[in-house]
Amino acid sequence: HPVESGGGLVQAGGSLSISCGSSEHIFVDYSMGWFRQPPGKEREFVAAIDQIGNRKWYADSAKGRFTISRGNNKNTVHLQMNSLRPDDTAIYYCVLPYKSQALSEYDRWGQGTQVTVSS
């Protein structure tokens, strides 16, 4: 399973970039995505990207503020988060392969990376 990294504490209005990847070459053949779980709430879809980085999908809450991209070797996926708000506070999880926005599609999750936005 790919490993998430890059989380941290940031003030509202700030930016943060998180990443997910591995040295395994198999990742280049799959769509990848991000979900998040805010404290006390259900896990939810954030963004996804296809195998070559041409098609991207975003939750309404992420549109215009977050940008998903793949690394040059296609083995990593990044989520650049701008204009962060306190309600973006969550544990962010990477999924591979990305199938759909439905949580029922996934039965394996990594440890995630914590993003905390202070007001």
Image (cartoon, grey):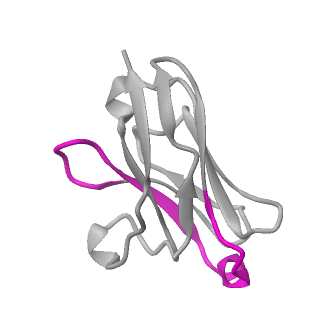
Q: Residue furthest left?
A: 40
Residue 95, given in percent of the width and then of the height, sits at: 47, 68
On the image, which quarter does residue 45 sit in?
Answer: bottom left
Which residue ends up furthest to the right in the rendered image? 72
Residue 101 occupies quadrant: bottom left
Give left or right: position of 94 versus 37. Answer: right
Picture layout, residue 80 above or below residue 104: above
Task: Tell me if residue 21 is in the magenta stretch.
Answer: yes
Foreground residue among 39 and 61: 39
Q: Work out whether 59 lies above or below 23.
A: above
The region drawn magenta spans 20-44
Above-or-below relation of 72 to 15: below
Q: Position of residue 113 (x, y in %)?
A: 46, 50
Quarter of the image containing the C terminus?
A: top left
Q: Residue at x 71, y 61 (%)?
A: 54
**Where is 66 relative to 74, above or below?**
above
- Which residue: 68% across, 84% down? 26
How many numbered marks have been drawn onto this rendered protein structure? 0
Q: Is residue 19 left or right of residue 10?
A: right
Say which residue appears at 64% left-offset and 61% top-offset: 55
**Image side of residue 56 versus residue 89, left or right:** right
Q: Residue 16 is drawn in which quadrant?
A: top right
x and y percentages locating residue 38 in the rendered image:
28, 43
Q: Is residue 63 magenta?
A: no
Residue drawn at (53%, 55%), measured in percent from left and top?
57
